[in-house]
Image: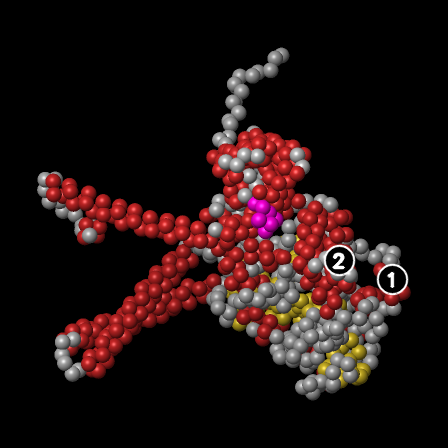
Amino acid sequence: MSELPLGADGEASADGADLETTADEALLRRFEPILRFTHGELFYPMPAIRYLEACDLLAGSSTDEWEVVVPAGSLTEASLVALGDSAPDDVRFLRFVQEPMHPLDLARFSQRPGRPVFSAPGRLARVGLFARILDAGLVASLLVRGKVPGGTAAAASVKYDAIRARDSRVAYHGRVVREAGWTVLQYLFFYPMNDWRSTFDGANDHEADWEQAFVILEHEPDGRVTPAWFAAAAHDEQGGDIRRRWDDPRLERLGDHVVVYPGAGSHATYLERGEYIRRLALPGEQVVHRVLDRARRTWRDTLNQPDPGDLGELLQRLVSVPFVDYARGDGITVGPGQQVQWSLIVISDRVPWVDGYRGLWGLDTGDRLAGERAPAGPKYTRTGTVRQSWNDPLGFIGLAGLPTATETRRVMADRIQQLRVERAAVDDEASARAATLPGIGIEVEALRDQQGVDTYRIRRTAELRAGEASLAGLRSSGAELTAAISAAEGYLERFDAGWRGDPRGHLTHAAAPEPPPRTTRRLFAETWAAVSVGVLVIALAVILWFSLLPIPATVGLLVVGYLAIESFAQRRVETLLLRVTVALAAISALLLAYHYLRELLLIGLGGLGLFILFDNAAELTRARIRKAPMAAAPVPPPVEREADPADQD
Amino acid sequence: MGTMNSAAPTPRRRRRRPFTLIILAALLLLKAVLVFAVVAGTLADETGPLASTLRIPGLTDQIRAAPGAGLVLILIAAILVASAVGLLLDQRAGWLLAMVTTGLFIAMDIVGFFDGNVNHLWMVLNIVTVFYLNQRDVREGVAAAPPAADAMGAR
């Protein structure tokens, strides 16, 4: 099946489609999401085929050596597919912008009347100096990495506007997959350009941008479909954290339509309105987290000092690259009953451009970090393999291990039965093992005084020990299985009573918007944030080159100076003073400890010795006190009671 | 028509002062007394064991060389007394004053430690002062920190 032909009103029609396709289309329509864009957005979801027709097709042996295979204006879906796949080591990609905008034209473009004006507090002022240095490194890396040329986004915007003048549809590509009792509605949004870096100071630009959302339905016994989950992916995330239960109180819905917030320029799909800061994952982060958690508990609970908060999170924030995804939802809204209505384009494996083209959908810059390379199509990754979101959507959203609600009872009952069988087998094995052990044990006892059988006795003793360990393991497994069965039965009981658990219980690291930025001393803070890293580098170079100060003094001076300015900008001078004082006190304490190390050791050992002495003396005294009344007191009448383990001393 | 004023005015409940705050104030007063004693010991130029314990070696020489330094020390002692009184009156300014002066003392202690001109008893007192200044109930008492329940990641 090819893409559905378009009706006169721009809506998709199921010309010649079978009944299933019509049903799929109805389902897609019924649950189509509402997208609230950010004011200033330049690109909206469009029919991929219109984009394709405006591109040229390039191919070559590398991203530096290519030639135009099909020029712009001549490329069609049929010609794209007819060319087939490229050789394994060759590159093949579409190019939407043939000529980036000239700098002078770009200056005029950015000042054009009626342009959408985007305003945001400086992203660099939201994070610390270290993160700004990381940011400077990433920006500098663009000089050596492949990147989308300047003026591409502006040229893409002009070209996109021209396409929209001919075909104004705002469209999504829909697909329905039925699997394991679920019906997955996959909504794919195609944007001609990701202009996050050039328009919104984000991390990257690239031509072509595929984003997606999922509605997961389950079929009731009476034939009705019920929405169970919604999922939306941002920045190649996947797994349970991108999924929300339909009854999640933080999932915004208008009837059957979930409201989502695409990031400005990046189009990453967020489920809550707000601004999101992208964070880097640190190597060894969990170990660092554990150490910092322990330090926090000691500081707070043992030393009764103020809670410093989640130090791991603080550290992560310190080294996060400050790219802000603006998902404000204050721009155009697309969806049922909104300013702009959706056009639906049903796609599947049978659509030629979906299945027959594995190349990239935009300029291949050869960026090693891939951020500035265009993606492949909805079905394929950049390496030509099939995307998990296409061939295994349930696994992609972390739902492969969960049954539908209607299946839960049967699946859980089956599982309980399996667990019982497993426990019975473990119990049987434990009983058999327990039956054999006494024989070996008594034999080992008998061999203890027997001469000339040392080797045999050692072997039997080892056998006895192994048997005991095995029996202990089996009994432990039996206890665990019993607990698991009990938990499963409890779950089933609650499930039958209508309980469905915490709707957010499966979330571990769900994306959450940042709190609103502090606006105090904003001008100063933003100016300082913009110039701080550059000034730091220049100051360091000048001081070192002219040998104005020794290196440790230089570093110390710069650190203190920067801390003072940063804390002033953020109105945290008092916090800084306190922290400096506490740090100095710690250094002072260490110096004294070092100076009086012998005396401290002496005091410590003396204290330990005294503690042991007093403890033993107290025990001795208690023992004497216990004995004395027993000798003197009359014998009380016997009282029936359970044996107290303490009396056995 | 006069206003009805049937309800008796509720007496303002006085918050119990944290014990750690009292210790802190006592520490600051003790330090003020010690500073006075240092000045007195230096000017009297006594050689007894108490005076030599209290005397900071380098400071003693400086005060001897520049009598104006004695006045500075008296001023510092007065600041310590003022911050102790401020703390006892639950004034945030008292806490701030104590924090800044103690921070300066410790910075001078560290420099003095490497120069060999430091009184170790004085260093210990300053460290203990910082420990108490940063105590949760002290900071909450003088509104230098939000209450524990509102603090980020509160227990």
Q: Pick whichever, A120 or A505, lies toward us.
A: A120
Residue A434 at x, y percent in the picture: 22, 71
Q: Pick whichever, A571 or A76, lies toward us.
A: A571
Q: Can residue A498 be seen in this view?
A: yes
Q: In this view, does A197 lie above or below A338?
A: below
Q: What stretch is highlighted in magenta?
A: B110-118
Give yes or no for residue B111 being in the magenta stretch. yes
Please give the name of the residue rendered at 14% of the width and 43% of the height, measured from the top-left corner. Answer: A630
Q: What element carries label 1?
A: helix
Q: Name the residue under label 1.
A: A107
Q: Pick whichever, A347 or A230, lies toward us.
A: A230
Q: Which amino acid does label 2 sit on?
A: Leu
Residue B76 at x, y percent in the picture: 62, 35
- Location of residue A253 by image quarter: bottom right
Q: Is mark 2 on a helix, strand or loop?
A: loop
Quarter of the N terminus of chain A within the rendering: bottom right
Q: Mark 2 points at which residue?
A: A548
Give yes or no for residue B97 being in the magenta stretch. no
Q: Which of marks 1 and 2 is nearer the N terminus?
A: 1
Please give the name of the residue rendered at 77% of the width and 63% of the height, measured from the top-left corner. Answer: A545
